[in-house]
Amino acid sequence: MLGIAIIRLGSLFAAVMLTGIFSLVAAGLYVSMDAVDVAFTEAAVGGGIATMLFLSTIALTTSQEKTGGEVSFPAFFIVVLTGIVLMYGVSDIPKFGDSQAPAHQYLSDRYVNQSPREIGVPNMVTSILASYRGYDTMGEVAVIFTAGMGVLMLLGRGFRNSARRNSPKGNSPEQQGKVKL
Amino acid sequence: MEHHLVLRVVAKLLIPMILIFALYVQFHGDYGPGGGFQAGVIFASAFILYSLIFGIENARSVISFNLLRILSALGLLLYLGVGISALIFGGNFLDYNVLASNPLSGQHIGILLIELGVGLTVAAVMTMTFFVFSRP
């Protein structure tokens, strides 16, 4: 429902607000599933930072969606097909809390029983993320670093020069022109 | 936002608490929910709140852009460094058992250090992204 509302809304500002609300609701859902760490991340990143970045993007561009443009049928077909395949895949996922799920057969058992002795950290999520899955987390940090560098390369052009000038009124003429545009 | 007195007062009260909470989440991640990623995001949100209320120029004079770039690389390097120092001490890559005399405290030191690396990178990258996006 929220998703349809977000798609149908012409005003991008309202759409951004709705995505923020959706993130908060999702965080509540994760708490009710006892996944507090994930809920924490969702509330901080989805509800906070992502909303903030969307808003500053709107400030850089425009707050109204461009209307018009006809529906492309091959694209529509591909989207619907992907949706059907994804729904088919979802039907194969074990139910929430199913004790017969493959992940609960030996893996959870091993972590729950062995990690206090091997790692000795009370929060098991931390011990899995940081120690058992250390490579994965390292990859994630590298991804975040690379993403930051990518944003810097795309948008940060001339940033250092304006930082070096560092006076509030020190805008060059072409920068002022850009602001007016 | 010069004239929003209520916002300024509330932000001044909130920002130190947000920073302290971020540090708590960072270093208490072993015992409670949280960890480097969440702590980094919370830490960055304090800077973002500051620059929303008091202006981006003031925020840039608090923490310079170059420092952010260095910090974001430093976090990743710290993570890699822990992995490589485990190699040097005779274990596998990212095997924290060898970092101290007994395996448990080695794991503890390793996890604390890599979480610090994650937190540094995330906080620096998030703040940097916001600065770049909100360039005047």
Image (cartoon, rainbow, N blue to C red):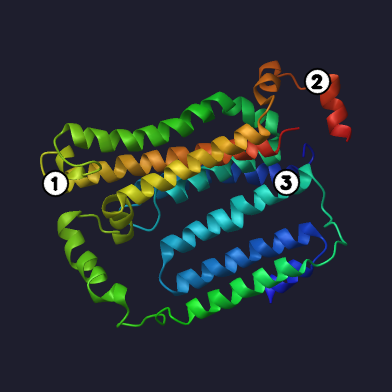
Q: Quadrant of residue B9?
A: top right
Q: Chain of mark 3?
A: A
Q: Earlier in the sequence, mark 2 or mark 3?
A: 3
Q: Position of residue B75 (x, y in %)?
A: 41, 35
Left or right: B124 in relation to A130: right
In the structure shown, which secondary structural element does the residue marked by tag 3 occupy? helix
Count neighbours of disc 2 (C-alpha within 10 A) and say few if under 14, some if 14 to 19, many if 20 or more.
few
Vertical order, B68 against B93 (above or below)? above
Judged left or right of residue A68, residue A31 is: left
What amino acid is labelled 2 in the image?
Answer: Lys
Residue A4 rendering spot, x and y as whole percentages: 72, 73
Given the current orientation, which residue lies at the most extreme front position? A74
Which amino acid is tagged 1? Pro
According to the image, label 3 marks what residue?
Answer: A57
Q: What's the amino acid at mark 3? A: Thr
- The chain under label 1 reads B
Q: Are tags 3 and 1 found on a single chain? A: no
Query: As displayed, is residue A116 above or below residue B129?
Result: below
Report which residue position mark 2 lands on.
Answer: A169
Q: Are marks 2 and 1 on the same chain?
A: no
User: What is the crowding at mark 1: few (fewer than 14 residues within 10 Å), some, or many (at least 20)?
Assistant: some
**On residue B103, which mark appears?**
1
Does residue A18 appear left or right of residue B94 in this picture? Answer: right
Residue at the spot x=76%, y=70% of the render? A73
Nearer the camera: disc 2 or disc 1: 1
